[in-house]
Amino acid sequence: MSAPRTVQVIVAVVLVALLAAGCSSLRDRTERAVSSATPPRTTGPPPGASQAPGPPLATASAGGAGAGAPSDPTDPAAVATYCFARWQSFDARSDADLSAGVERAQADGCFTTDFFAQLTSAGAGSGGAGGAGSSAGDGQAWQEQRAHGARSTVTVLAATPLADTASTGRVVYLLNTRSVFTTNNSTPVETVSTPKVTLLDDADGRWRIAGADLSDNAGDAPGR
């Protein structure tokens, strides 16, 4: 083979190699660009997600408290979820006294007449915050809470029926609750508890809380 012919062959081989390398590099850059533009596929719950302690959420009615009234006063789970949170949440910076939570919930029609009287009578004890019968010691304790900017937001994560059925006009719910307690600028402290509430059906079909067992409650709110 002549020298010019040999040079032509070498040049052709080099050009083919360079072209192949260029195509490969372009393909790699294209694949990387597509990969970065497409969000990674995710499965399962988001990072950090967990199920709160208490009754399985799969068999419970979940929900949170809004403002004004239960979403459906004829649904005992909705009433238990909304009313317990209204009753047990407090903010000493703006609430007048220990009975503020009770009065807030009662304004929304949350309690039976008998249970409301029990809550607002002297010695209401663990049934909830005391009202007119609150002692001077309770008033002093409230002032101390106010001085520290104490507040607690209670959320009902789930409500599971324990006894009877709605058709009987009486139902008991085990609540799965979360309390976030804060004083001034301190780091919020989160606790969970599983209190029980009993609800009765009024003649008009509306459910109201007629009793409560807070023995497994976290104990953040005054009067618990």
Image: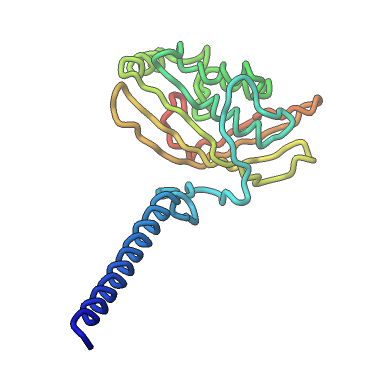
Q: Position of residue 130 (x, y in %)?
A: 50, 19
In the displayed structure image, the side of residue 66 where residue 147 appears, left or right: left
Q: Is residue 116 above or below residue 77?
A: above
Q: At 75% from the left edge and 40% from the top edge, which residue is drawn?
A: 166
Q: At 25% from the left edge and 76% from the top edge, which residue is drawn?
A: 8
In the picture, residue 185 is in which quadrant? top left
Q: Assign the N terminus to one quadrant of the image.
A: bottom left
Q: Is residue 1 above or below residue 176?
A: below
Q: Nearer the viewer, residue 128 or 66?
A: 66
Residue found farthest to the bottom: 1
Q: Position of residue 15 (x, y in %)?
A: 28, 70
In the picture, residue 94 is in which quadrant? top left
Residue found farthest to the left: 3
Q: At 32% from the left edge and 24% from the top edge, which residue is drawn?
A: 183
In the picture, residue 181 is in which quadrant? top left
Q: Position of residue 104 (x, y in %)?
A: 56, 17
Q: Position of residue 180 (x, y in %)?
A: 41, 32
Q: Nearer the viewer, residue 194 or 177?
A: 177
